[in-house]
Image: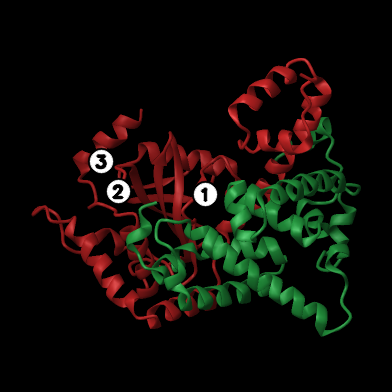
Chain colours: A green, B red
Amino acid sequence: MTNDMLTVPERLVAFLPNLRRFAISLCHSRELADDLVQSTCERAIAAADTFVAGTRFDAWLFRILRNLWIDHLRRAKTAGPQEDLDQASEVSTPSGEAASDARMALLEVTEALQKLPEEQREVLVLVCVEELSYRDTAEVLSIPIGTVMSRLARARKNLADLMGISIEGKRSSGMKGGVA
Amino acid sequence: MKQPEFDDETLMAYADGELGDETTARLEAALETDEALAARLAVFLDSRATVASALKPLIHEPVPEALLTSVRRMAEKAGPVEDGLERKVIAFRQKQTAPSRPIHRPWLIPIAASLVAVIAGFGGFMLGREIGVTGAGTDAALAAALDRETSGNDVTLSGSNETLRVVASFRDEHGDLCREYERVRHGVSTVSIACREAGTWVTRLALSAPHAEGYTTASAQETIDAYLSSIHAGAPLTPEEERAALAALR
């Protein structure tokens, strides 16, 4: 990208949809995501001089957002008896309609994602949605690249289990039938 | 040496394009004969595709007005941005130095848009390849129309009741052909910028608003301006240049 000429605040506005997608993917609540994006932007503007020109702007912002999210989780945890997030289930899943669906046995992707431990969800989103390399992901999360890989592999096996993805099954269920 | 063995992380790295050449070659050789290995690999290929197709489209969601306004205000307060915006607009206008070309951006005037902005991000999304807002059929029709239609005409997208008007064509900093267009559907107007990348139209920016013709809100215009200057958009192509550019797509 030749966006290096632009200042951090300038690039921030154009990056909002991306940042918001990452936030929604992490916290599964748009309201929370928007707060998170807002705080991230404040933080990014205040710390604009720590951004090194020529490095990945997205990784830098994801790191800020992710750290704020982890802070939020920590506070929420110490604020009172909360569900262990690693075990979190049915927190924000509207069930009624989904349950009556033909795919009853299978969890929707987003539901399945919410059932993953936070540390697995974040690597999954960074690599598979935001398309960061393992190395960039390791930097965003401040963990070794080997840890990125082991978490990511576990996340994907867990996801496949949760969704009941069998290799043959998925292909055909991906096709939608009649058109209204 | 012992039998080549491939653990989950190796298979995953292959699925993610992160495996070194040497191991890739060994793995590919093994995959030809080992069905169980292929099935294990499929879990990693499929999980990536599944997560991507579920979450990537979130980028099309309009950024709430309050958030956009708040961040823009923050950015303005940060100081340099105002100078920056001015500098960018000047930089943008400098490209329009050809005497026959208008100094103002006339193609922005008919845009109807409000504060609700969807910017597709630097990655953009592929028309007809990811789940679009209006469905794959419409996206295919849209892509075909972008290949074909000259600026300034209203056309109805085949198989829909959507109206398309290509507002202008221009080239970005890489020389890629870009088109700014407006779609009107059920009284909602979306102004988008799509650029031709590797044989596909990739949407770069989209602004949605209740349809009202003839004006652009200052905020929407700022967003478009900021975006166009960030991709170093050139001046709008003349009708002749546009015809040549479209012919070159075929």
Q: Position of residue B46 (x, y in %)?
A: 73, 38
Residue A30 lies in quadrant? bottom right
Secondary structure of the residue carrying tag 3 is helix
Identity, as a three-letter code, of the amino acid under mark 3: Glu
B144 sits left or right of B236 in the view: right
Q: Earlier in the sequence, mark 2 or mark 1?
A: 1
Residue A113 lies in quadrant? bottom right
B139 sits left or right of A129 in the view: left
What residue sits right under mark 3 in the picture? B242
Q: Chain of mark 3?
A: B
- Mark 3 touches mark 2? (CB < 8 Å): no
Between tags 2 and 1, which lies in front?
2
Quarter of the image with the C terminus of chain A is: top right
Which residue occupies 64% across, 70% down?
A67
Q: Chain of mark 1?
A: B
Between tags 3 and 2, which lies in front?
2
B41 sits left or right of B150 in the view: right
**Other residues around mark 3 within 10 Å, as few (<14) / some (14–19) / many (≥20):** many
What residue sits right under mark 2 in the picture? B173
Q: Is residue A85 above or below residue A55?
A: below
**Other residues around mark 1 within 10 Å, as few (<14) / some (14–19) / many (≥20):** few
What residue sits right under mark 1 in the picture? B161
Q: Position of residue A107 (x, y in %)?
A: 84, 51
Evaluate whether label 1 is on the same chain as label 3: yes
